[in-house]
Amino acid sequence: MAETDAQALKRAALDHLWMSSRDWSRTEEEGGPRIAVQADGIRFTDSDGKTWIDVRGGYSSVNVGYGRAEIAEAAHEQMLRLHYFPQTSVTETQVRLFRKLAEITPGNLERTWATTGGSEANETAVKIARSYHRRTGESGRYRVIGRRGSYHGATQGVMWLGGYDGLSDFYPAYPGIVHAPQPNPYRCEKGGATPSECAVRCAKAVEDLIEFHGADTVAAVIAEPVSASAGNAVPGGEYWPMLRQICDRHGVILIADEVVTGFGRTGKMFGLDHWGVVPDIMTMSKGISSSYLPIGGAIVTAEIADRFAADHDHFRQALTFGGHPVSAAAALKNIEIIESEGLVQNAAEIGAYFKDRLRELAERFRFIGDVRGIGLMLTVEFVSDRQTNERFPKSLGLGEKLTERFHREGLLLEASERMVSFYPPLCITRSEVDEIVDGVSVSLSETAAELSLR
């Protein structure tokens, strides 16, 4: 791409594009926006000709990597054959995808309501939970318990499920949402001294909320197997089995948000496979198509689905592009690649290697307080004091300085004063991990020297 074309594109972007989590004034000052023009595997090239490693894998979503022509071909073939479905009909591709999802998801999850993404999937799951209770004669169950620090989407309902920080523009808050602690062993809100103790206390806190508000008012508990937005803290082994038992005991629907953790990210096909727990509803998106096309869904157990089987009980929602047949074709081919190329196992093995390499950095840099995560969702947390786990003040500029140096090293990676997280495509190799860690090491060294960090 000629330099003049690149400059014209950047100017057009600054004039007309409203990017997420970015302001155009600062973006222009930094010489942006960055315009990606080509990609393959874990790398992409921008309009200035610079090649980067996408250490975040899109939005933690490019599971099979960039440049998979076979996914594009599957979508193209479907579009030529039938680009959309006539009303009250379905396509062969959709049916094959939903059958495949029933085969690979845990337990008796069997029927999928299709959406275009993760926010819609979680909105749908909450609506299904509330609708289910109405059909079983418990219309008073409207509350939903989420966890502080989690993230379940950007739409008006689910955006409140992780707490209220940063949402003042959108008040009043959605009614009926209650917040439980995050089971983070490194910073346990309930004071647990070990992962097990933290897990038990945080699970018990969910039951305490149910009992405080009255089980007859609680519709559902929603949680990610491992919360990306809360820094990839893996809960102790007791947490998820206890959560399942608590929900069963009180007649509460358990919703597992697998939008990030699904389709191999954690080293299992789904995050809950690590604990052998089957939720009542599981939401998915991102890795289902590796972001080649927008698609998502909420898959439910037979028990939940059967309450909506009769005509007068059908679920009252329609999404024009939910389960789009072209997206379904891309998702099917994407899942085929994940399975045939052993990417779930690769995420487990390379993820363990990546974590070990990051732990080596923690031995060198005292301001790394914790290295955690599972599979290829990993986090390094920064602290000013390892004894107290005190955080750095935002005014220090640690996150900005680290991010700037990551970019100099060709790593598309964003840090805050608190942490930096890694979600590379599942096709990543050991040598590519080494390349990333080398770049991170240089960035940490230079930033530590500049800020006089130990």
Image (tube, helix red, strand yellow):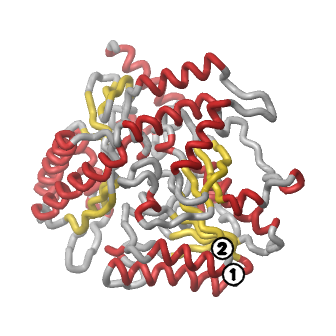
Q: Amino acid at mark 1?
A: Ala
Residue at image position (37%, 19%) is 6
Write down the quadrant of residue 226 in the picture.
bottom left
- Residue 215 in picture, x, y percent from top left: 69, 81
Q: Quick one: label 1 or label 2, which is nearer the N terminus? A: 1
The one nearer the camera, 293 or 281, is 281
- Residue 185 in picture, x, y percent from top left: 35, 75
- Residue 421 in picture, x, y percent from top left: 32, 54
Q: Which residue is mark 1?
A: 215
Q: Is residue 226 above or below residue 291?
A: below
Is 361 on the left-hand or right-hand side of 1?
Answer: left
Q: Residues within 10 Å of mark 1 (few under 14, many from 20)?
A: many
Q: Quadrant of the C terminus?
A: bottom left
Q: Amino acid at mark 2?
A: Val
The one nearer the camera, 282 or 406, is 282
Residue at image position (68%, 58%) is 302
Residue 119 visible, this angle: yes
Q: Which mark is residue 252?
A: 2
Is 201 on the left-hand or right-hand side of 113?
Answer: left
Is 20 on the left-hand or right-hand side of 50?
Answer: right
